[in-house]
Image (cartoon, helix red, strand yellow):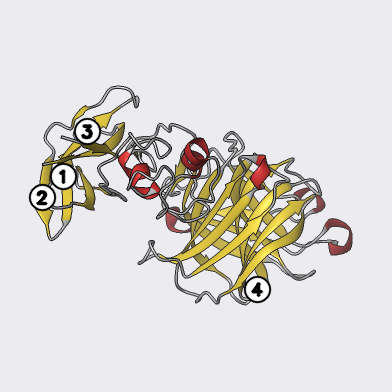
Amino acid sequence: MISIKRYLSVLILISLGPGLLAQIIEDDFNDGNDNGWERYSPLASFGAPVEFSFPEGNSYRVQAPASPNPGALGPSRGGSYRPNVVYEAFRVEVDLVDWDNDIAQDIGLLGSLGAVGLATTNGYAFSYDTGGEGLYISSVSGENPNTLGSETITLVPGQAYRLVFQGFFAPEDFYGQLLGEVFALDDLETPLAVVFGSDYAYSSGTCGVFTNTTSDSGTTDATFDNYFSSSDTDVDRDGMADQWEVDNLGDIFWYEDEDFDEDGQTNLEEFLGGSDPADPNSLAGALAIGPLDVRVANGELAVGFSAQDGYSYELETSSDLQGWSPAAGAVLNRLNGNGTFVLPIAEREQLYLRVVGSRE
């Protein structure tokens, strides 16, 4: 039997408790506070502090007043970031759930953030411009943005969207690759718009959210929810983790349907199967298990996946990525090419999961 094991991009981390592993940060703001965040209010000492609030106790609103002196201090702006988590590659997501569309402002995400402060902040920004009605990726030097890529789109006020921003910077010979995407919340598989950028000025740093007026006398007002960040990236959108591509193929510019070692299996099949794409004797069995659809509700964990005919499946768990064992009590339901493991969760805990497929 050939066992096929999928980890992170291949291995799926399920965080069911307050602890966090491997530089993964999640915050749904349901606790009604921003503990763990560093608020950015650069004009507070000049009489223009940013207001941070938690509408209905489950989201994060950032409102910056007008700048008292736009010529000397710059325009109205504010945000918040996670100061204690530094990424060399980043994936950061947030739901944009509300904003004042009558205000000309940029709203979005920050990555590779460093030297945070008045006229000193560096990094990268992915934003939606309510005035220009478009998406932008920018490098930021001393708080001054420089556009690296843009895409036209109009977001509808009153609807919520997910913003996703990724940056990957290794190896340096291939420059840094940046990707921004926006999704409707009812379809997180197909982006409404995609924008790319390339730069290598800032190859590590923290992540966060921000607002910035685009007029000298303007203010800002945006509400965020469901923040997530990690170091697991796929900036070329080929289904293969960027670091895996560099480690195994030398760079990220190989296509998923190519066959690097000419063994009859595509690079994507070898990634999903856990085999070595540079070794023709290492075969994966060409079984694509992912992506996994993981949900927690009513004391049960449900893990959905694509189940192919001719394969049997088992759900395994681990607390440390070293020792793996079958998930006790897991029940598999299969219907029309889909499989779902249902596993009772007796208490809040943190664990890793993987689905193992074996050819029958």
Q: Nearer the viewer, residue 13 or 80?
A: 13
Q: Where is residue 184 in the image (x, y as percent from the top left)?
A: 42, 68
Find disc 3 in the rendering and name its residue: 316
Direction from residue 300 to residue 36 in the image, left or right: right
Mark 4 vs 3: CB contact within 8 A: no
For label 1, the SS is strand
35 shown above or below 213:
above
153 shown above or below 143:
below
Q: Position of residue 153 (x, y in %)?
A: 56, 75
Most extreme residue toward the right is 72
Direction from residue 101 to residue 117 in the image, left or right: right
Find disc 2 in the rendering and name its residue: 333
For label 4, the SS is loop
Mark 1 vs 2: CB contact within 8 A: yes
Q: Which image quadrant for residue 53?
A: bottom right
Disc 4 to disc 2, C-alpha distance = 50 Å
Q: Earlier in the sequence, mark 3 or mark 1?
A: 3
Disc 1 to disc 4, C-alpha distance = 46 Å
Q: Earlier in the sequence, mark 4 or mark 3?
A: 4
For label 2, the SS is strand
